[in-house]
């Protein structure tokens, strides 16, 4: 099983300059290759990794600065771009902005990477054209290195090793008859059908006040000035701690749910679409823009998508199956009598059925409905939320798309 190991680097000034240069070259290659792909698509042609890799070798003769970065790092950048274009579309892949994109690059050849432990707290790795770099040995490596990714977060640099740890996903969970439904919300991050609430604050009151003062100071700064960059660095230091706490919470919660349940049922939420801006256009401006923006911030703050990714990652080691169900009416349906009514939910936390009088916490009731939808097996042997297999094979059709009887009636010969 492939797993990631991330460590904080301790680089000297020369290595920092090299990393910045490698990141800048990779960003330039990404943007140029993306523009080339878009231009080909506008002309009705197609461009992929193979011809771009050949043109990259030719471009090194005309632009010698491209040879300053390792060749396989630049080729890996083209491979990443090719995969992004195939998965998302050429015109949906984003540019890598110098101001907004943090430098990162990958060494794909694991046989060129050497990792050694030099002390109780320190290790070192030999990377092409960077030499030996020290990193904080915070956890065992636990396998053979397949690749290494160097990235910058704020002021610190990190290295992530992709290792083969030799583990395999269990064919069966340790507790195969267990299942749980999880309702994700903006008040409580995750509520299970067992009545357990998983939540924690990601930012303290002091950090929130400091962040608000820094944002006010940033609004008065001249864009691109040294003062603006200094204020942005302080803002990133605060928001970086918030992101780390959110990621830690999602990883811990996912590990707890995956270890105790063979099936974890979630709502199939499109977080990206749900958090889209409501500002609209000049011709058709949106309504309740401020309220929608506050809701978007609350949804993103709870890390709905991050929790789903963490669950899928934790499920690899426990054999847990993650099931997605249709989220429609899960918060308005009574779990006891299945009565659907928007008035059932009295408030954010109170649920009282207008038909049978059943009372429960609104999030717990929704989690129970989610669990029931995930466990609902239809007569065709699959989950009710998924596409069913037809019970009978389809009738034989001719090349014209008609059944044999209709084809004969129309005077079409049938072979």
Image: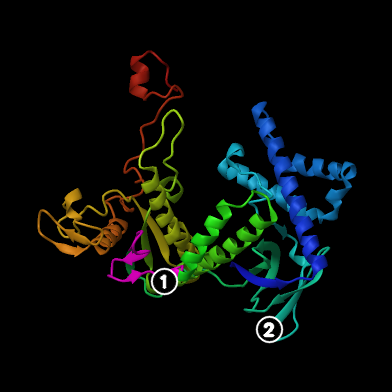
What x and y, as percent, mark residue 203?
46, 68
From the viewer's perspective, tell me whether residue 302 is left or right of residue 164.
left
Residue receiving disc 1: 173
Which-is-in-front pick, marks 2 and 1?
Answer: 2
Q: Residue at x 20, y 61 (%)?
A: 350
What x and y, as percent, mark residue 339?
16, 52
Q: Earlier in the sequence, mark 2 or mark 1?
A: 2
What x and y, as percent, mark residue 186?
36, 59
User: Quick one: quadrant of the N terminus?
Assistant: bottom right
Q: Nearer the viewer, residue 323 or 391?
A: 323
Q: Residue at x 29, y 48 (%)?
A: 328
Residue 314 in view of the camera: no
Q: Magenta span has 191? A: yes
Q: Is residue 282 above or below residue 117?
A: above
Res 121 label: 2
| Magenta-drawn segment | 182-205
Measured Cα–Cα span from mark 2 to mark 1: 35 Å
* Residue 114 falls in image quadrant: bottom right
Q: Magenta span has 43? A: no
From the viewer's perspective, tell me whether residue 354 is left or right of residue 112.
left
Element marked by disc 2: loop
Residue 352 in view of the camera: yes
Q: How is the image coloured?
A: rainbow
| Mark 1 burial class by Cα count in 10 Å: few <14, some 14-19, many 20+ | many
* Residue 307 falls in image quadrant: bottom left
Q: Residue at x 68, y 52 (%)?
A: 225
Q: Residue at x 78, y 55 (%)?
A: 72
Q: Nearer the viewer, residue 112 or 327?
A: 327
Image marks 2 and 1: residues in contact by CB distance under 8 Å: no
Element marked by disc 1: loop
| Mark 2 burial class by Cα count in 10 Å: few <14, some 14-19, many 20+ | few
């Amino acid at each position: 099983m492939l797993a990631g190991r991330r460590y904080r680097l301790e680089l000297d000034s020369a290595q920092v300059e090299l990393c910045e240069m490698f990141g800048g070259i990779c960003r330039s290659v990404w943007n140029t290759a993306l523009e080339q792909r878009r231009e080909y698509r506008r002309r009705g042609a197609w461009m992929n990794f193979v011809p771009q890799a050949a043109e990259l070798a030719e471009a090194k003769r005309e632009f010698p600065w491209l040879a300053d970065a390792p060749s396989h790092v630049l080729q890996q950048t083209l491979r990443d771009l090719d995969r992004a274009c195939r998965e998302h579309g050429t015109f949906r892949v984003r540019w890598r902005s110098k101001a907004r994109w943090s430098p990162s690059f990958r060494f794909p050849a694991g046989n060129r990477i050497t990792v050694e432990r030099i002390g109780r707290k320190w290790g070192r790795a030999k990377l092409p054209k960077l030499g030996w770099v020290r990193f904080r040995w915070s956890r065992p490596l636990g396998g053979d290195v397949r690749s290494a990714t160097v990235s910058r977060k704020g002021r610190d640099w990190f290295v992530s090793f992709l290792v083969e740890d030799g583990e395999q996903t269990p064919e069966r969970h340790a507790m195969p008859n267990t299942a749980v439904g999880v309702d994700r919300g903006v008040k409580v991050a995750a509520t299970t059908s067992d009545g357990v609430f998983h939540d924690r604050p990601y930012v303290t009151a002091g950090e929130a006040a400091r962040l608000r003062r820094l944002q006010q100071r940033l609004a008065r700064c001249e864009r691109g000035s040294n003062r603006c960059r200094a204020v942005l660095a302080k803002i990133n230091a605060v928001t970086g701690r918030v992101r780390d706490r959110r990621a830690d919470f999602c990883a811990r919660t996912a590990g707890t749910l995956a270890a105790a349940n063979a099936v974890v049922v979630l709502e199939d939420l499109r977080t990206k679409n749900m958090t889209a801006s409501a500002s609209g256009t000049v011709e058709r401006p949106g309504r309740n823009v401020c309220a929608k923006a506050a809701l978007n911030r609350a949804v993103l703050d709870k890390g709905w998508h991050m929790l789903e990714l963490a669950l899928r990652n934790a499920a690899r080691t426990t054999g847990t199956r993650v099931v997605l169900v249709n989220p429609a009416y899960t918060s308005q349906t009574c779990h006891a009598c299945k009565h659907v009514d928007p008035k059932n939910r009295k408030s954010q936390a109170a649920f009282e059925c207008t038909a049978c009088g059943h009372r429960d916490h609104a999030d717990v009731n929704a989690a129970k409905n989610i669990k029931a939808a995930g466990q609902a097996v239809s007569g065709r042997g699959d989950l009710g939320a998924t596409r069913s297999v037809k019970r009978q094979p389809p009738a034989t059709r001719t090349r014209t798309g008609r059944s044999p009887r209709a084809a004969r009636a129309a005077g079409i010969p049938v072979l």
